[in-house]
Amino acid sequence: MNRRAVVAIILLGAVIGGVAIQQGVVTGYEETTVTIQDGDTEAQLVTADVRVADTVFKQYIGLSNTDSLGTTEGMLFVHESSDRRAYVMRGMSFPIEIIFVNAAGEITTIHQAQPGDDDRFEGDGKFVLEVRLGFTDAFDIAVGDEVIVDRWHVAGGRFGRKETLICRRKLL
């Protein structure tokens, strides 16, 4: 196969992949439960059902193809390591809170973001939890509280184990 044909095939694949992403064809989000507890008393504050964005494509799309979230619904972004990160409101049609969580499960930063915000919302974390605006106020959640992720598979970095592992103790 000549070089032009190879380049044409690569470009066609990139265009088709880009259209698939824009149209929301990338599906198959795993779902799990996160529990947030008070960092001082360990009292349970809330449990939420979340979709897991654990690949670059899922993280790029995020909640942009979502019309709204229920009171205790959200999306959990899972990264390979804890690091300084920035999130944006690309394609969002409703306000959200962006909660950064370090590898030990501690909430490090909470941002409130509106559709159309051009800001970069930055924080330190291995995980980022996006929930509807008002979530943290409704459940009295603050920086320093702890996030427990159900079904975290430590070895492979993917969800799927049947037992519950507490990320503040197991994801180091």
Image: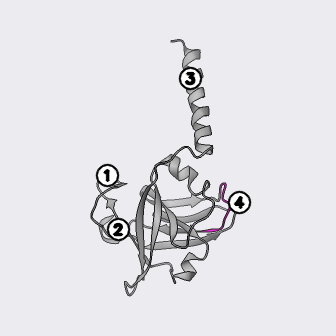
Q: Amino acid at mark 3?
A: Ile
For residue 92: magenta? yes
Residue at 30%, 71% (x, y): give it: 169
Cα distance between the residues tagged 2 and 1:
14 Å
Q: What residue is drawn where x is 60% and y is 21%?
A: 8
Numbered circle sitting on residue 118 = 4
* Place of residue 93 in the rendered image (x, y in percent of width and height, measured from the top left): 68, 61
Name the residue carrying label 1.
Answer: 156
Residue 156 position, x and y percent, is 31, 51
- Looking at the image, do the residues carrying marks 3 and 4 touch, with CB atoms under 8 Å apart? no
Rounded to the nearest angstrom, the CA distance separating label 3 from label 4 is 35 Å
Q: Amino acid at mark 1?
A: Gly
- Labels 4 & 1 near each other (Cβ < 8 A): no
Report which residue position mark 3 lands on: 9
Q: Which residue is mark 2?
A: 167
Q: Nearer the viewer, residue 142 or 67?
A: 67
- Magenta residues? 90-96
- Sequence-wise, which precedes: disc 2 or disc 4? 4
| Disc 4 secondary structure class | loop
Q: What crowding class fits label 3: few (fewer than 14 Cα within 10 Å), some (14-19), or many (20 or more)?
A: few
> Marks 3 and 4: which is nearer the front?
3
